[in-house]
Amino acid sequence: MNFLEKVATVDRVPEHYAKMSNDEKRERIYEVKRKLGNRLFIPGHHYQRDEVIEFADVTGDSLQLAQLSKENRDAEYIVFCGVHFMAETADMLTTNDQHVILPDLKAGCSMADMADISQTEFAWTELQKVMGDTILPLTYVNSTAAIKAFCGRNGGATVTSSNAKAMVQWAFTQKQRLLFLPDQHLGRNTAFDLGINLEEMAVWDPIARELIYDGTIDDIKVVLWKGHCSVHEKFTVGQIQELRKNSPETNVIVHPECTFDVVQAADLNGSTHYIIETIRNADPGTSWAVGTEMNLVNRLASQFPDKKIFSLNPTMCPCLTMNRIDLDHLLWSLEELVEGRLHYPITVDEKTTEEGNLALKRMLERPS
């Protein structure tokens, strides 16, 4: 059953949760945590709501949380406060005795959904017809388990926004070209930083099922999958220009999932971890316009009141799918565990796990 099929089976949160006060929900969540003790582990992604992060045992990015889940051998239940592909990765890395739970099955990722396995296998066949055995697949960890497995069985690997440069360099030691899934912007920004010209990059459109490129096939070094993050695409060069005019002292820092033009116009760009640490270590009194998810931006502003921190996009909303997990869903999933029921368990089959872990292993063996 794929993600969309699973979503069709989602039940509504029982009505009695809506009648509780937030204080009652919070107390009941703490009670479950006390009751289950070390048997329960709650990882929370940086983009989650503050009301959810309050109960997280650890916070971090998607791969970091999956790795921490793997290291926690005491936890029988891993209630992953993130999105579907993150819970899949956690299930792939943990043991069969551990159960990964996603509090709301509708917490997906539009970027990950932009590359399904049938589209990818079709593209791979077509690309090999014109490029032969010269191409290696890399996938951003923000992808489904099936796409990670595809890369694993075809000699490729996963990448994060922190190690993308190192992994692209590694890919070129294996083959003369690469297919970068599913985020074209991270792929383009990374390749350009490594000296690859835009003219040497093509785009594969999975909907039109065609390669978009003006030059000759021989000149292509990177094929970018036509996918994107719906949050990071909402940052524009116009916003940066307006900021430069009205607040020239403000530093602009953005995530490399933003478009090429935005990344080039910003002062700094880097992974979520890079953004957090850069602002943490910045001088008091400095001003920062941040191009990433709104929950994180607001949390940074709260954590570092000695600096002026705000979203580059003044009308930005939190990521809709990341924002689906709330107190009601978290409490419901936890109380189901107490009753002995696994509420929305995320399981990846053995073959997909084996091949997906191979892609992850190739990445983790490389120096970042």
Image (cartoon, rainbow, N blue to C red):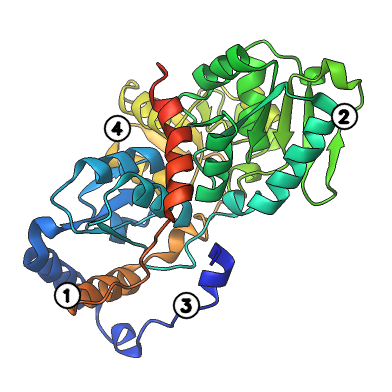
Question: Where is mark 2, residue-wise?
Answer: 213
Label 1 is placed on what type of residue? Answer: Val
Q: Is residue 302 left or right of residue 186?
A: left
Label 2 is placed on what type of residue? Answer: Tyr
Q: Tell me the number on the disc at residue 338.
A: 1
- Residue sitting at x 92%, y 26%: 214
Using a 10 Å C-alpha cutoff, classify the residue at mark 3 as few (fewer than 14 neighbours), some (14 to 19) or many (20 or more): few
Question: Where is mark 3, residue-wise?
Answer: 10
x and y, in percent, of residue 90 in the image: 35, 48
Question: Where is mark 4, residue-wise?
Answer: 306
Q: Which of 107 and 284 lies nearest the eye of the viewer?
A: 107
Label 4 is placed on what type of residue? Answer: Asp
- Residue sitting at x 24%, y 55%: 42
Residue 240 in sight from this viewpoint: no
- Which is nearer the N-term, disc 4 or disc 1? 4
Q: Report helix, strand or loop for mark 4.
A: loop
- Residue sitting at x 58%, y 50%: 112
Q: Which of 236 and 109 lies nearest the eye of the viewer?
A: 109
x and y, in percent, of residue 118 in the image: 69, 53
- Which is nearer the N-term, disc 1 or disc 3? 3
- Residue sitting at x 84%, y 32%: 129
